[in-house]
Image (tube, rainbow, N blue to C red):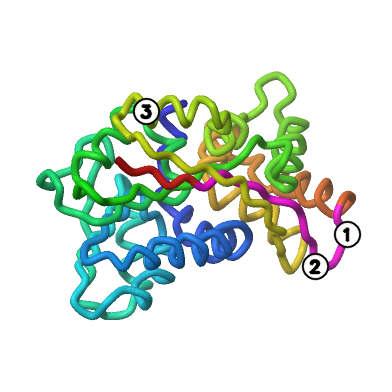
Amino acid sequence: MAESDKVFAGSIPHFYDTLMVPLIFGGYAADTAELVASFSPCAVLETAAGSGVVTRALAPRLRADARYVATDLNQPMLDYAAARQGADSRIEWRQADALALPFEDAAFDVVCCQFGAMFFPNRVAGYAEARRVLRPDGHFVFSVWDRIEDNAFADDVTKAVATVFPHDPPRFLARTPHGYHDVALIREELRCAGFANIEIKTCEKLSHAPSARDAATAYCQGTPLRNEIEARDASLLQLATDRATQVIASRHGAGPVAGKIQAHVMVAAG
């Protein structure tokens, strides 16, 4: 993973939350919130909280006396998430590294992480930290994207942007968000971290955007793909977005567009 893959700063948090969240994250966030709430937790830790889509979905489902700690490595994303969340004394916002959590052992009933594990430099270490802070009967709930070929817009955008930089195509989407999809590997790394009971489900959904332009802008300007494009030639960001728009429109239509998205959802315990 390139260092720029972890940078969510500048205008990225805004584009991410206003375009990417409704495009691909909202539906899975609702599912995650329902799954976490089903355990009736008293204390929840969220890692890689991003712009707060899971936090906004989960907080209303938790009991009145629950403790909810939302963390992220990127302070700009955490600041954005906190600003979007309504006043709630149960929620603590804290910058934290999922690989070195600043919490005592056995402090939480549930640790959840939506689409963050792909960014862990050492996933076994991150999973071991989640297990360390879980109570003995606790659950680790997290999700990762399936391969890029099963996620239509991400695949379209990656191919389109490659035509702008044919000699050095940006590969952020394929390399990181969609680079950790091997279910056997995920299961093995969870076992290495000490989890004994592991459930994995593959969940397909349909992604919707008001237009091909919105979908293209979401990926090109609301993710670290933007960092890769600008590192090559910042003046070509708009051209890259235009190319992605053209490809999505050619494959999914000029008006409102829809495309397949697919992810793996894990529940680990023990």
Res. 164 image quadrant: top right
Residue 211 in view in this figure: yes
- Please name the amino acid that badge 3 sits on: Arg
The numbered mark at residue 67 is none
Res. 80 image quadrant: bottom left
The numbered mark at residue 256 is 2
Q: Is 214 left, or right, of 186 in this rendering?
A: right
- Please name the amino acid that badge 2 sits on: Pro
**For residue 44, above or below residue 189:** below
**Residue at the (52%, 33%) spot, across then down:** 176
Give the class, few, some or many, for how many residues have Cα within 10 Å of label 3's Cα (few <14, many ≥20).
some
The residue labelled by disc 1 is 253
Give yes or no for residue 164 being in the magenta stretch. Answer: no
Which secondary structure dominates the residues rendered in magenta? strand
The stretch in magenta equals: 252-265
Element type where label 3 sits in the image: helix
In percent of width and height, residue 256 lies at 80, 67
The residue labelled by disc 3 is 191
In percent of width and height, residue 15 lies at 53, 59
- Please name the amino acid that badge 1 sits on: Gly
Quadrant containing the C terminus is: top left
